[in-house]
Amino acid sequence: MSQRKNKNLAKCIAFLSKVDIPMLKQTARSVTKLREDEGNISPRSVADIVKQDPLMTVKLMRYLQQHKQRVQEHEIMEVQQVLMMLGLETSLKKVSTSPLVEDVLSRKKMSALAYMLRVTHRANLASMYAFDWAVRLNDLHFEEVRIAALLHDIAEILMWCFAPTAMLKIKALQQQDKTIRSNTAQEKVLGFTLHQLQLELSLKWKLPKLLITLMDDDNSEQQRVRNVILAVNLARHSANGWDDAALPDDYEDIGKLLSLRAEQVMVIVGAEEQQDFKEENC
């Protein structure tokens, strides 16, 4: 990595390590509503809300790692366990429901907000796919795989929040030149790739080693990592429409993972239903 890349990456990591991570407005509303219903609030009910928001999830995990107790012998990746380890009241007090993404990205950056929300939606879809496939593979720790898929693109989400102008420039480059690789466009604008940022940031925040491994595409020889990668790919490609040219290869790869035919994969991910719906309404 060049000196410029090192400098730019270091500055970005330093900033993101200190900044107060925002959350989605819907997450804040749901948490506030739950707090008003004292009879139903519990680590599980709060976790069910937090797990829908990759920003809130990583915010909570970062706080735990920053305040890790010596008695904590094992790494914790599950949101409900994090809430129990910190204490529910402490979690809700210290990991506040502010700022909001919608406030961080003002009206001048509405296009960036739209892109950020798309990536967030994609992350949730990927987490659901990864969860389902982990269960099918009899992975007893399916929640770890689900969280890894949810946070796989957290660096991109954070950059949409805090570097929207740069991210819009990357989008513009990709729209102007359909052949340019994402990594090339990112390096040209940022001086580093989002993959590099993700890895370095995870290490800086001392996130669980297992989580870092599961989020790293370089470990694709491991079945659980392949699960995460394929879930992320399917969510990304299907976001372009269920007629995206990359999807047939996705179905084949997922089929190899689950020992299914591509046609069976299309059924379990709902691709056939989407295509039938499109044909009926054309």
Image (tube, rainbow, N blue to C red):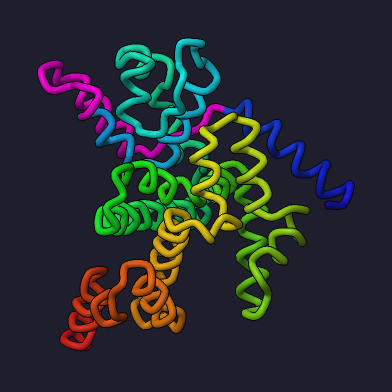
Residue 8: percent from left, percent from top:
79, 44
In the image, farthest residue toward the left: 39
**Residue 46: x and y, percent?**
26, 28
Query: Which residue is drawn at the image coordinates 40% and 58% (left, top)?
Result: 122
Horizontally, residue 163 falls left or right of residue 123, namely right
Residue lying at 61% horizontally and 59% vertically, measured from the top left: 168
Total tally of numbered discs in the picture: 0
Quick check: 21 left or right of 183? left
- The part of the image, by quadrant, that contains residue 187 is bottom right
Q: Residue at x 10, y 17 (%)?
A: 39
The image quadrant of residue 207 is: top right
Q: Which residues are magenta?
A: 20-44
**Foreground pick, 39 / 151:** 151
Q: Quadrant of the C terminus?
A: bottom left
Question: Would you say residue 26 sits in the magenta stretch?
Answer: yes
In the image, residue 240 lies in the stretch drawn in magenta: no
Reply above or below: 160 against 31. below
Relative to 265, does residue 214 appear above or below in the rendering? Answer: above
